Structures are given as C-alpha cells and as structure tokens.
Image (cartoon, rainbow, N blue to C red):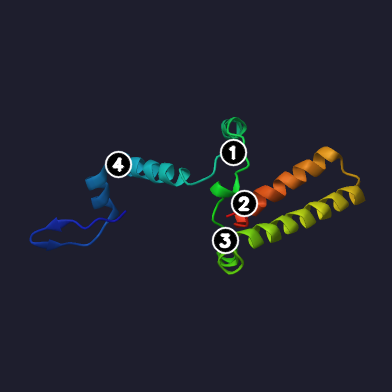
Amino acid sequence: LLVPHLCCGGPQAWSISQSQRIFGTMGLRRLLCLLVASVAAFVPRTGSLAQTRRREAAPTLQMASMAKFGVFSPAVYAGRVLLGDKSLEKIRGQGISLHSQAITEFCIFVGATAKMRGLLIKKAKTNGDILGFLV
C-alpha cells in the first residue's frame, strides 16, 4: 500500500516506509484479514454444516400459483393471453403427460425401478418450475 505523505504544503513521493508509518504493520495485516473475510463471504460453503442445513430444509414442490419466474415464463404468459387459461392448461397437461410417458419409457429401457421413475418425474417438475413453465 502506497500512501502519499503531505508535508510542507504539497505531496511528496510515495514510499512504502511512509505508508508503514501511517498504517503500521498490524494495520496492514488487519486490512488483509478483512479483505479475505469479505471475499470468503461470497464463496459457497462445503462441508458438514452446509449439508446439515440442506437436509433440514428439504425442497418442496410448489404449486402453479407460487411458481418461479424463469426463462420460459414470458412464453407461458403470451400463451395465456393468446390461447386463454383453459386452452393453455389443456396444452400444458398434454405436454406433462407426454413427458411423463417419455420418462416411463426411458426407465423401462434402462431397467430403472418405479421409485427412480417417480424421482425423475419429481425432478422434471422441479426443473419445469425453475425454467418457468409453471407460472
């Protein structure tokens, strides 16, 4: 850290020794610790504490009235305006049905269990919510 030293009516040359006199060695160490701590706040945690919190707050499936705004939300809103609520719900139901059938066929093809099929369908619903299909 280089800090200008004001003396005799004007700034003199910058030097490390003058900044050490102003901040001191302990001041620079404290500044460095604060910078590291502030950067650490933006790094995602890994370890047992983060995993414990994830287990406590299990993700819940949200209904359509509480869906997230995603990439495809504007298209869904446009479809609602152009087609109306009943037509949009009918098309959405057909799309969900076709997707569930595709997941079922995939599970049969790879030999997955019924439990795995259910988990894949739940994951599809969660992803659809994140992408904005359920607004």
Q: Residue furthest bottom?
A: 82
Residue beneath label 4, please?
27
Dot label at residue 73: 3
Quadrant placement of the C terminus: bottom right
Whichever of labels 3 and 1 marks the residue nearer the N terminus, that label is 1
- What's under tag 1, amino acid-wise? Thr
Residue beneath label 2, please?
129
Q: Are marks 3 and 4 in contact (CB under 8 Å)?
A: no
Report, in whole angstroms, how far the alpha carbon at label 3 lies from the one at label 1.
Answer: 32 Å
Dot label at residue 46: 1
Picture residue at 27% right of the left edge, 42% below the top: 24
Quick one: label 2, few (<14), some, or many (20+) residues within 10 Å?
Answer: many
Secondary structure state at the residue bearing disc 3: helix
Picture residue at 22% right of the left edge, 47% below the top: 22
Q: Nearer the viewer, mark 1 or mark 4?
A: 1
Report, in whole angstroms, how far the alpha carbon at label 4 lies from the one at label 2.
Answer: 49 Å
Whichever of labels 4 and 2 marks the residue nearer the N terminus, that label is 4
Secondary structure state at the residue bearing disc 2: helix
102 vs 43, nearest the viewer: 102
Q: Nearer the viewer, mark 3 or mark 1?
A: 3
Picture residue at 18% right of the left edge, 62% below the top: 12
Q: Are marks 1 and 2 in contact (CB under 8 Å)?
A: no
- What's under tag 2, amino acid-wise? Asp
Q: Nearer the viewer, mark 4 or mark 2?
A: 2
